[in-house]
Amino acid sequence: MNRKANESAWRGVIGRLVAPVEGIVTPRWMLLLLRLGLGWLFIQSAYTKLIAEGGWTASGYLSKSTGPLAQWFQGMTGNGAVDGLVMIGEMLIGIALVTGAAMRFTALAGSAMMILFYVAKLPPAGTWFSQQLVYLVVLNVLATARAGTFYGLDGLLKEWERRVPALRYVLG
């Protein structure tokens, strides 16, 4: 079987598998579900920290930092401002994802947070792949795909973006 015939056969198989959901599940709906799911994870993480019995602190995580920046991270141990910034950051990122607000800025802020969480434990135990890297990729996919414009606040602000082109760096 030649290459073109093989590719055509695969397209036919894939077409038959996708046909029942075509029109129901579109890439835009999948991005919406991905955005809402990740937003919920951020909100849930912040809320869990907020209601933790006896209060939550990042001290346990920071005190066990490894790698080239370990001393810097360990120096933040016991700092209440760091604890508050983590909780507030997670909550705001989660709310922005759920509402579809300022997706590019949200992705930037979330990516910065995930990178800091990741490098605090270098080299990672067991594998280099971690949930922080998954969050990082998903945040950037959402920003690149302008996921906030589909059932999100960014979609409501499209007209402003046309009037003020600089907003395109924040919205998405």
Image (spheres, rainbow, N blue to C red):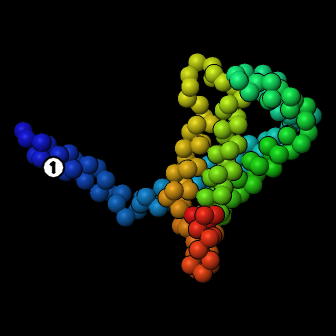
**Quadrant of the snapshot with the N terminus:** top left
Q: Is residue 73 visible?
A: yes
Kind of residue indicated by mark 1: Ser
In-front residue for pair 34/84 = 84
Q: Vertically, is 55 above or below 14?
A: above
* In-image side of 4 versus 55 (left or right): left
Residue wearing tag 1? 8
Residue 92: % across, % down: 75, 55
Residue 133: % across, % down: 58, 37
Where disc 1 sits, the SS reads helix
Residue at image location 56% in from the left, 56% down from the top: 143
Residue at image location 51% in from the left, 51% down from the top: 141
Q: Residue furthest left?
A: 1
* In-image side of 14 versus 109 (left or right): left
In-front residue for pair 68/58 = 68
* In-image side of 14 versus 44 (left or right): left
* Dot 1 alpha-carbon crowd within 10 angstroms: few under 14, some 14 to 19, many 20 or more: few
Q: Quadrant of residue 132?
A: top right
Q: Quadrant of residue 163?
A: bottom right
In-front residue for pair 165/151 = 165
